[in-house]
Image (spheres, rainbow, N blue to C red):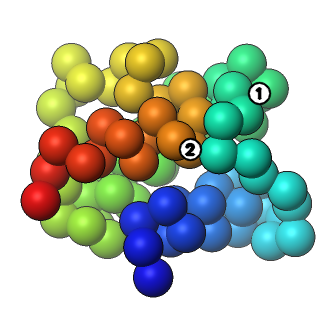
Amino acid sequence: MDRKTLLADFIKTEIIRNRNAQLDESEDLLGAGILDSLSILKLVAHIDESFGIEIPDEDVVYENFHSLKAIVDYLQKFP
């Protein structure tokens, strides 16, 4: 599976807690209240565990985490 699918599955199952939830890749996850500070920390830990990518604290900003597309685009920086 690709990163986008794995991240969407994680957000649906671990954060929204509804595997059948609809998640548009452009949806503002922060504005919609899907992600908050605690769930972003869970997501960052998941990215580290699943992809071996350590995200620096200074990169945990709105621009990188406001949507599924933004997260996937940010992770493109890492091989």
Q: Are marks 1 and 2 in contact (CB under 8 Å)?
A: no
Residue 50: x %, y % from top left: 32, 71
Secondary structure beneath dot 1 equals loop
Residue 72: x %, y % from top left: 41, 48
Q: Quadrant of residue 19?
A: bottom right
Name which residue lies at 36% across and 41% down: 73
Q: Identify the image quadrant of the N terminus.
A: bottom left
Name which residue lies at 63% across and 69% down: 9
- Decide: is 65 above or below 12: above
42 or 78, nearer to the observer:
78
Residue 13: x %, y % from top left: 70, 67
Label 1 – label 2 distance at C-alpha: 14 Å
Q: Quadrant of residue 74?
A: top left
Q: Which mark is residue 10?
A: none
* Residue 68 horizontal side relative to residue 50, left or right: right
Sort mark 1 into few (<14), some (14-19) or many (20+) by Cα contacts within 10 Å: few
Secondary structure beneath dot 2 equals helix
Residue 6: x %, y % from top left: 50, 70
Give the amino acid at mark 1: Gly
8 or 43, nearer to the observer:
8
Instruction: Farthest residue to the left: give it.
Output: 79
According to the image, label 2 marks what residue?
68
According to the image, label 1 marks what residue?
33
- Asked if residue 38 can be seen in this view, the reply is no
Name which residue lies at 79% across and 26% down: 32
Instruction: Farthest residue to the bottom: give it.
Output: 1
Q: Quadrant of residue 28?
A: top right
* Residue 70 horizontal side relative to residue 55, left or right: right
- Decide: is 22 above or below 56: below
- Asked if residue 56 can be seen in this view, the reply is yes
